[in-house]
Structure formats: C-alpha cells, structure tokens
Image: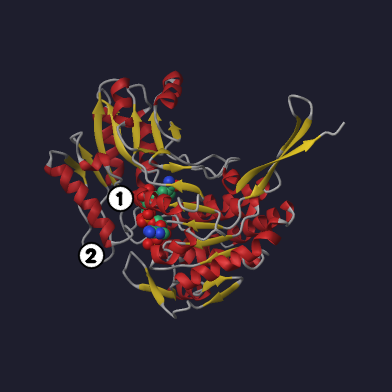
C-alpha cells in the first residue's frame, strides 16, 4: 500500500529537531540549523539544529556529570531500559523503517530488516548488561588473593555513518548503556533523523538525563575535535571510512583514548568449482545488492573458478537485471537511490574506468536519468585485475567478476587488499570452507552465506578495516576496562 503524504508529515513532525543535551532537546548555541534531504527526490524532509564546538562541549559536560551515578546503577536496571527500548522500537518498526527510507533511500523492505537487526542489539545487550563478570583467584605463591573486576570506561564519543542509520547507532549505544558508560553521539549529517527519534525512545524508556547526548552537525571535525583532547573523554567508537578513521586515530593519540574502529571493506566473494551455483547466486544478490551496495560488508569483488564462471555470470546477471530501481517507499522498488550525487558519480567513475580498460557491462553500467541519485544494478565481466574498481570500495550496486584457476590464486587475489572486514566463500567441501577461514585475512567469513551481520556475533575487521568488535559477547568489552585488586593475606 502506498505511503500517504499525511503519514509522512505526521512522522516527520514527531522527530525531535533539537540537540539532545542533558536530557533536554535544545537549539544549537549558534542558532544554526541544516536541512536533511530525501535522496530519492532531493526534497528537504526537515531542518534540525546544527551543533558546533560549544554544543559538543556542553554535551560532554553532561556526559561527564552523569557518569558516576550512571556507572553505579544496577546492571539489571540498565538492562531493563534497553529491554523497554527494544519493545518500543519493535512496536514502532513501521515508523523507523519509513524514516530510514525517507532519509537514506533504502527500500522499505530492507529498512524493516534493519529495524529488526538494529533493535536486536538492544535486546542482546539488555541480556549482556548483567554478565560483565570478573574473577577471583589465589596468587600462585599463595600469599595474596587476586580480584579482577570490569568497570565502565567512562564517557564515550560515538560517531556513526549514514548507511545504516539505526543499526550503527544501536550497535554502539546498547553496549555502552549495558556497560554503564555515558555518551555523546554524532550521527551522520546526511541521515540524523533516525538517531534523533531513537534517542527520544531511550529517554522514554527511562534513560537518565546526560547519559545519551546527541549532536548532529554539518561540521564534524570542528565540532568534535576538542572532545578528543578533553581528558574527561575516555573512548572513541567510530564507524565510517578508513580515511576518516585513520585521521581520528591520530587525533585520539594525545589523549591515549580507547578506540573502536569499524572502517571500510573490499570483500571478496569466492565461488569454487564445487559450489552450489544457484545458492551462490542467491548469496551474491544479498551480499552485493543489500542497501544498494552501500555497506561495508558489500561484496566488492566476485572471484569465480574458471570452470563455473560462465554459469555463475549468466545466472547472476539475469538475477541482477531483473531488479528494479525506484524510490524506496514505492512497492516493487528493489534498489533505491544512492545517498548523493557525489557517491553516484564516484560509482560511475569506477565503472567507466574498468570499461575503458576492457571490462564488459553484462547488465547496467550507468546512472538512471531523472530525479534522485539512482544507479543501474550492474555486472561487469572480464575486469582487468589492476582495475581501480577491484582496489576501492565501490559503495554501489556494481558487481565486478574475475575468474581464478585454483585455490592458491583465489586466496592470493582475495587477500590482495589493505582491507580485511569480511569474505564470502561458496563451496560444498567443508574442509575447503574451513581452510578458507584459516587462509583469508578477514575478521568475518560468510561460508555459503551472503549475510554475516548478527547481533549475537562479533562484527569487525582486521588490517585497515578496523579495530575492535561490535555485538556478541565481545561487544560489551569495548566499553569496559579491567581492574585488578590485589588483596594481601596477612596470615
Ligand atoms: P565517513 O565519511 O568516514 O563518515 C562517517 C562519520 O564520520 C560521519 O558521521 C561523518 O560526519 C563523521 N566524520 C567525518 N569526518 C570527521 C571528522 N574529521 N571528525 C569527526 N567525525 C567525522 O563515512 P560515511 O561516508 O558516512 O560512511 C561510509 C563508510 O563507512 C564506508 O567506508 C563504509 O565501509 C564504512 N562503514 C563501515 C562499517 C563497519 O562496521 N566496518 C559499517 C558501516 C559503514 P558527517 O557525515 O556528518 O560529515
């Protein structure tokens, strides 16, 4: 059923448009505001407050003031807040899905999937809040006792990207709440509305004032820069590009900040000669086209054994060609717009570069004319191995295919990147699948699976894809530090 303009207006009217500082929504100190656009139409959805350095300082003041009392709340109470927030987001799943589609562009069905995924972090960490276990032991020489406890690291700066507006926020906020940390969240300027609505849900769920502060801004570096050198800030958790992550790591060095970095990817998708090709095509569709390819986990390079390359390419191309581009709120749209003109132009530049070097567009190959930033779902064959498109994150619905001769060559090609977030492997040989886990330099592996994201699993990369893990039992550790108490035995 089509979404009515009245429903959209009513939802947008509910989104808080201020900065959340110390439990209150308030205007920016400068009075500045900025417009958030719908990438499917270019229309302004709503204007919200544009934080500056003074607002960021006020947000950290609030977070620092709230830290001690928040750390002292009962773990069960923190868990209950998350559990209530989980219920509230689930009850309002359609609102969150629509809001994400409006500001980010993804099809409604995918936005609903993100609501499920994003809200599950709230449920998972509501359970983990009561399991920050330490230990007690007798020293080896028997002369003292060793008590090991876990404590919240303290006020955190959380910076999130635009591509998963709810999940990237809950993946950080939920473990920080569970651990007893206070926070300043800076959502992406392109898609801040979902985080704004979610922050109100957290307040309604009983989160005390000052624990979560939210400062959308169009001047990210200038606004958050001073926080990184403020001794009250204890942690930076960043999800975004490797380039910005690298710069933030340098900025975080003087303060020796704890950091978690979820950065870019260049995922290889390997199809071996013994793979179930139909299953590989299904997995490839998810790994490539989910979120229009605008995912750090998106398959960026399809490496296919030469004996099955023709069959895989033919079936995959047919499946990709059957997908429809269109505004995410329209039924029947499989592929929404890219986030902005710059992203669309970058995708086309990579495609043009590959085609001019000899690649062949098996389907698609260009932008879609008309309003919005749509790009045709594209499959490229015969892609030269030194093409830029195989080195850089595409962040669009484009699948380059390269064939390989044997397992050693597949591994060499897959690992030939500075990134190491995820790899996908299709094979029916279990030993080969496990061997790929051993040989591939990635933090995650999808074995006959095109999607690996799961709130109960540790998400994260190696090499220049990042540091630390989000989700799983590992996720809360990013927000805890270990304290050891040595107890002398006078006897
Ligand atoms: P981005 O340009 O690096 O921005 C990410 C966030 O950092 C945004 O909130 C941005 O603010 C902010 N930012 C930019 N410069 C900053 C600075 N100097 N100081 C403080 N904050 C700064 O990345 P993006 O284009 O939003 O997202 C796409 C990238 O994220 C891709 O590389 C993707 O692979 C990666 N990603 C990784 C994961 C993962 O878990 N590994 C998940 C999702 C996305 P503004 O947008 O407001 O400028």
Locate the C terminus and report the quarter of the image it occupies: top right
Give the label on residue 396, or none.
Answer: 1
Can you see residue 190? Answer: no
As drawn, 301 above or below 61: above
Give the label on residue 90, or none.
Answer: none
Position of residue 103 measured from the top left corner of the image (x, y, whole percent): 41, 65
In this view of the protein, which residue sits in the foreground, 416 or 220?
Answer: 220
As drawn, 172 above or below 362: below
Can you see residue 204? Answer: yes
Label 1 and label 2: CA atoms lie apart by 18 Å
Task: Report the residue marked by disc 2.
Answer: 370
- Residue farthest along the bottom direction in this orientation: 31
Position of residue 366 measured from the top left corner of the image (x, y, whole percent): 20, 52
- Name the N-terminal-most of marks 1 and 2: 2
Question: Looking at the image, do the residues carrying marks 1 and 2 touch, with CB atoms under 8 Å apart?
Answer: no
- Residue farthest along the right direction in this orientation: 491
Q: Quadrant of ligand 1?
A: bottom left
Position of residue 195 measured from the top left corner of the image (x, y, whole percent): 50, 63
Q: Residue 312 is drawn in which quadrant?
A: top left
Position of residue 292 measured from the top left corner of the image (x, y, whole percent): 35, 51
Mark 2 CB lies closer than 8 A to ligand 1:
no
């Amino acid at each position: 059923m089509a979404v009515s303009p009245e429903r959209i207006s009513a939802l947008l009217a509910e989104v808080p448009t201020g900065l959340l500082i110390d439990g209150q929504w308030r205007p920016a100190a400068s009075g500045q505001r900025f417009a958030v656009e719908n990438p499917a139409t270019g229309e302004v959805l709503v204007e919200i407050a544009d934080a500056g350095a003074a607002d960021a300082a006020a947000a950290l003041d609030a977070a620092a003031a709230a830290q001690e009392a928040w750390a002292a709340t009962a773990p069960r109470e923190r868990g209950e807040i998350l559990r209530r927030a989980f219920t509230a987001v689930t009850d309002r799943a359609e609102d969150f899905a629509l809001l994400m589609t409006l500001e980010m562009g993804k099809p409604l069905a995918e936005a609903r999937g993100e609501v499920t995924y994003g809200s599950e972090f709230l449920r998972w960490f509501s359970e983990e809040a009561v399991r920050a276990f330490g230990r007690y032991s007798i020293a080896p020489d028997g002369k003292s006792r060793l008590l090991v406890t876990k404590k919240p690291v303290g006020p955190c700066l959380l910076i999130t990207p635009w591509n998963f507006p709810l999940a990237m926020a809950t993946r950080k906020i939920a473990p920080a709440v569970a651990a007893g940390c206070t926070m300043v969240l800076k959502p992406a300027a392109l898609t801040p509305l979902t985080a704004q609505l979610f922050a109100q849900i957290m307040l309604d769920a009983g989160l005390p004032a000052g624990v979560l502060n939210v400062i959308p801004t169009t001047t990210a570096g200038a606004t958050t820069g001073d926080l990184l050198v403020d001794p009250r800030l204890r942690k930076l958790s960043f999800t975004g590009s490797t380039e910005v992550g690298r710069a933030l790591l340098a900025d975080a060095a003087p303060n020796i900040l704890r950091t978690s970095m979820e950065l870019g990817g260049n995922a290889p998708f390997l199809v071996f000669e013994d793979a179930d090709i139909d299953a590989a095509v299904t997995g490839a569709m998810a790994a490539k086209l989910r979120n229009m390819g605008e995912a750090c986990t998106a398959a960026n390079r399809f490496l296919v054994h030469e004996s099955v390359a023709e069959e895989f390419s033919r079936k995959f191309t047919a499946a990709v060609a059957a997908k429809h581009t269109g505004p995410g709120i329209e039924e029947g749209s499989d592929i929404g717009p890219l986030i902005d003109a710059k992203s669309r132009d970058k995708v086309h530049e990579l495609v043009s570069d590959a085609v001019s070097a000899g690649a062949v567009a098996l389907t698609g190959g260009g932008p879609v004319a008309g309003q919005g930033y749509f790009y045709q779902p594209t499959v490229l064959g015969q892609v030269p191995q030194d093409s830029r498109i195989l080195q850089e994150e595409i962040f669009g619905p484009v699948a380059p295919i390269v064939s390989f001769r044997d397992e050693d060559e597949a591994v060499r090609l897959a690992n030939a990147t500075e990134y190491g977030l995820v790899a996908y492997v299709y094979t029916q040989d279990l030993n080969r699948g496990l061997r790929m886990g051993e040989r591939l330099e990635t933090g995650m592996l999808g074995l006959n699976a095109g999607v690996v994201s799961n709130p109960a699993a540790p998400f994260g990369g190696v090499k220049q894809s990042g540091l630390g893990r989000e989700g799983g039992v590992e996720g809360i550790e990013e927000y805890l530090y270990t304290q050891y108490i040595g107890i002398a035995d006078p006897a």
